[in-house]
Image: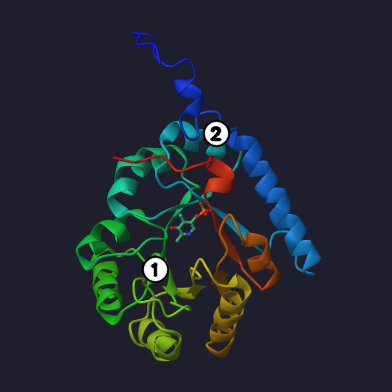
C-alpha cells in the first residue's frame, strides 16, 4: 500500500448514516405501518410510530421533524437533555418518549424533559417517579416494561409480577399508566413475546402496547401494537454518540 497524505477517497461515504435519506425512509416505514394495520383489520392510524433517534444528531433529526413526525424516542436521559430542549422549544407539538432504563438519580431530569416514560419497571423507580411528578406538577404518561423473555440482563418486571406491579403503579401510586412495553430476546420468535404482552395488558384493562422495532414492527402491529419504536429503518446505522 502506498503511503500518502491523501485521505482515503471514500471516507465520507463509509461513515455510517452519512448518505441516508431519512425522509424517504420515514415515508417507507409509515407506509409499511399503514399496510400492516390494514392487513390486520385495524385502522391505518391505530399504530403510531415512535422514531428512535438515539445517537443521531440534529442534522438527522430535523428532516424527520420537517416531514411531520412528532413522536420521538431516546434511551438515555443525558443524551436527550443535550439534544431535545431546543428542538422541543422550536416544535411544541413534539412528544419525547424515554425508551431506555431509568436510574432513580435521573428521575428529576426525566420527568422534566420526557412526555412519556416507557420503562417503569420496579417499585423503587415508580415511587420516585410519583414523588417527582408531584413535586414538578408534571405528569408524563407511563408504560410498564415487561421482561417477557425473563432475561437477567434485561430491564422490565417479570411476567408473573406484572399484575401486582400494574396495581401498585396505576392504582396505588396513581401514575398515568397507558400500557405495557417489551423488548423481546433477539434470538427468539418475537410473536410469542408480543402475544404474551398483549395478554398481560388485556387482563389488566390496559389498551396500549409499545412493541416492535425495525426488524419486527409489522409482526407487532399484527399482534396489536399501538406504538412501534423504529430507529435504524429510518435513520440508518447508529452513530457513536459521545
Ligand atoms: C434502539 C431501540 C429501538 C429501535 O431499534 P431499531 O432496531 O433501530 O429500530 C427500539 N426500542 C428500544 C427500547 C431501543 O433501545
Judge from the rendering whether residue 181 lies leftward or rightward of residue 192; answer left or right: left
Identify the residue at horizontal 73%, vertical 56% (top origin).
34
Identify the residue at horizontal 41%, vertical 36% (top origin).
57
Residue 203 picture quarter: bottom right
107, 79: nearer the viewer: 79
The residue carrying mark 2 is 63
4, 88: nearer the viewer: 4
**For residue 69, above or below residue 190:** above
Residue at the front extreme, as displayed: 1
Residue at the top extreme, as displayed: 5
Q: Residues within 10 Å of mark 1 (few under 14, many from 20)?
A: many
Residue 215: numbered disc: none
Identify the residue at horizontal 79%, vertical 63% (top origin).
38
Mark 2 → mark 1, Cα distance in angstroms: 27 Å
Percent x, y for residue 22?
Answer: 58, 36
Percent x, y for residue 149?
Answer: 47, 78
Q: Is mark 1 within 8 Å of ligand 1?
A: yes
Total number of numbered discs in the rendering: 2
The residue carrying mark 1 is 119
In primary-sequence order, the first of circles 2 and 1 is 2
Q: Residues within 10 Å of mark 2 (few under 14, many from 20)?
A: some
Q: Secondary structure at mark 2?
A: helix
224, 158: nearer the viewer: 158
Q: Is mark 2 within 8 Å of ligand 1?
A: no
Percent x, y for residue 134?
Answer: 27, 70
Residue 227 picture quarter: bottom right
Judge from the rendering whether residue 130 lies leftward or rightward of residue 12; answer left or right: left
Colour mapping used in the image: rainbow
Percent x, y for residue 64?
Answer: 55, 39
Amino acid at each position: 500500500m502506498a503511503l500518502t497524505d491523501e485521505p482515503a477517497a471514500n471516507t465520507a461515504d463509509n461513515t455510517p448514516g452519512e448518505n441516508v435519506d431519512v425522509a424517504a425512509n420515514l415515508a417507507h416505514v409509515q407506509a409499511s405501518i399503514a399496510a400492516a394495520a390494514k392487513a390486520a383489520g385495524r385502522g391505518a392510524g391505530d399504530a403510531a410510530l415512535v422514531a428512535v433517534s438515539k445517537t443521531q444528531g440534529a442534522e438527522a433529526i430535523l428532516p424527520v421533524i420537517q416531514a411531520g413526525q412528532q413522536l420521538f424516542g431516546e434511551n438515555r436521559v443525558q443524551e436527550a437533555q443535550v439534544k431535545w430542549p431546543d428542538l422541543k422549544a422550536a416544535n411544541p407539538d413534539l412528544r419525547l418518549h424515554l425508551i431506555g432504563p431509568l436510574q432513580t438519580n435521573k428521575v428529576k431530569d426525566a420527568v422534566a424533559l420526557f412526555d412519556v416514560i416507557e420503562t417503569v419497571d420496579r417499585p423503587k423507580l415508580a415511587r420516585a417517579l410519583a414523588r417527582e411528578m408531584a413535586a414538578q406538577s408534571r405528569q408524563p404518561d407511563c408504560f410498564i416494561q415487561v421482561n417477557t423473555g425473563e432475561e437477567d440482563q434485561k430491564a422490565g418486571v417479570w411476567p408473573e409480577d406484572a399484575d401486582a406491579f400494574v396495581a401498585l403503579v396505576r392504582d396505588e401510586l396513581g401514575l398515568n399508566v397507558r400500557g405495557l412495553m417489551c423488548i423481546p430476546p433477539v434470538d427468539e420468535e418475537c410473536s410469542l413475546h408480543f402475544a404474551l404482552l398483549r395478554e398481560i395488558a388485556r387482563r389488566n384493562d390496559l389498551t396500549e402496547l409499545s412493541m416492535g422495532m425495525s426488524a419486527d414492527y409489522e409482526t407487532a402491529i399484527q399482534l396489536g401494537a399501538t406504538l412501534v419504536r423504529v430507529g435504524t429503518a429510518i435513520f440508518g446505522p447508529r452513530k457513536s454518540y459521545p
